[in-house]
Image: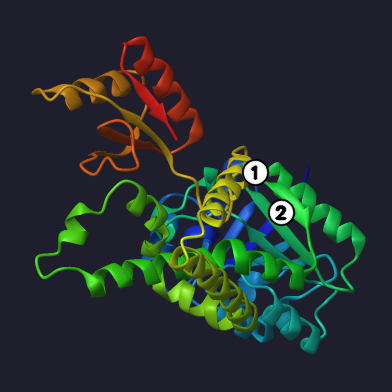
Amino acid sequence: MDSRKIGFIGLGLIGGSIAKAVRRYYPDDEIIAFDHNKETLALATKESVIHVACTSIDDNFKCCDYIFLCAPAGFNTSYLKELLPYLHSGLILTDAGSVKTPIHEEVTRLGLEEYFIGGHPMAGSEKSGFANSKPLLIENAYFILTPSAKTPAEKVEAYKAFAESLHSIPLVLDYQIHDQVTGTISHLPHIIAASLVNFVKDTDTPDELMKHLAAGGFKDITRIASSSPTMWQHICTQNQDNISRILGDYIHALSQAKEMIDQKQENGIYEMFGHAGSYRDSMPDSSAGLIKKAFCIYCDIPDESGAIATIATILASNAINMKNVGIVHNREFEEGVLRIEFYDETSCSRAVALLKKHRYIIYER
């Protein structure tokens, strides 16, 4: 196929990952990018991810086949007016934000519906910025498309094919449904994680016993609290109505749980945990979701010098990279004394097989 010209406004974690995926699968495509951070543009140029680094939205954006708005959600709408001189009939204008209603409303107000298809790769990390982006971040992740009312069908099909060619899983949704769904399965959990960490911080003992004893399950369920505060500030204000309603419903659910505990309703408490476990176990692991899955294994090792180094050597000699490794001191919710995290599912699966071959006892999550 003929090479394309693709523009990016914002080269953070998601914008950088999409750009790197395009570069990986379409090396002949021309990629241009604008970002306020000059160091980001310099790094993207040095790594040969982009061809042209723009210090403003200028004529370099003429004749693009795609323009991706990948700045924080609150900023993306403000860039629409700046892009007006560069719109043409063949262009697909899209974004990568986690909230869709505000940008769709602005697109409609400006009369840009024929160009615009909202986009949202359902992938992420607790780390942010171009330096942490990678082409495989969006692989096997749902890539939500939210066409406008006047978007030509052929553009929707073209975008679906493009997302699929980047090894994502395209899914077309109404933008309002999108915001309701993401508000519940992404925005709410991030708020819960942040508020839970702050609750522990504010109620900890003077000698910080909670901080030192918290590990395992607590760190797993609050990992996303380390996400970019700027990004989540924008998301919470952009999806305010949905999040407020969902939080209210969740607070009601917590109140019901408290009431069951106060009244020692044993059957109700049992059913709460039983239904939750069954529903969670039914969720597929085959694709990345809004909250990035951690690929971890737990391993029993002897308390002797060089035990961790031996495992590291076994993995390294087979070209398996570890993302993180640590000793689990709080074993209340975990099996295995050594926790090893990997960058992807393939590495994790290979490590399991390899370590079992060396007769280590492995527990998978």
The reply to whether residue 25 is visible in this rendering is yes
Q: How many residues crowd around disc 2 within 10 Å: few (fewer than 14), some, or many (20 or more)?
A: some
Residue 291 on image: x %, y % = 52, 55
The residue drawn where x is 25% and y is 22% is: 311
Quarter of the figure with the C terminus: top left
Residue 271 on image: x %, y % = 58, 51
The residue drawn where x is 57% and y is 42% is: 24
At label 1, the amino acid type is Tyr
At label 2, the amino acid type is Arg
Q: How is the image coloured?
A: rainbow
- The residue closer to the viewer here, 349 or 49, is 349
Q: Are marks 2 and 1 in contact (CB under 8 Å)?
A: yes
Q: What is the count of numbered marks? A: 2
| Circle on res. 4 | 2
User: Mark 2 or mark 1: which comes first in sequence?
Assistant: 2
When asked about the image quadrant of residue 101, the answer is: bottom right
| Circle on res. 26 | 1
| Circle on res. 301 | none
Q: How many residues crowd around disc 1 within 10 Å: few (fewer than 14), some, or many (20 or more)?
A: some
Quarter of the figure with the N terminus: top right
Residue 312 on image: x %, y % = 25, 26
The residue drawn where x is 30% and y is 30% is: 336
Helix, strand or loop for disc 2:
loop
The reply to whether residue 71 is visible in this rendering is no
Vertical arrangement, residue 319 with respect to residue 60, above or below: above
- On screen, residue 146 versus residue 259, left or right, reads right
The residue drawn where x is 90% and y is 58% is: 154
Vertical arrangement, residue 320 with respect to residue 189, above or below: above
When asked about the image quadrant of residue 121, the answer is: bottom right
Task: Give the CA separation, mark 2 to mark 1.
Answer: 9 Å
When asked about the image quadrant of residue 363, the answer is: top left
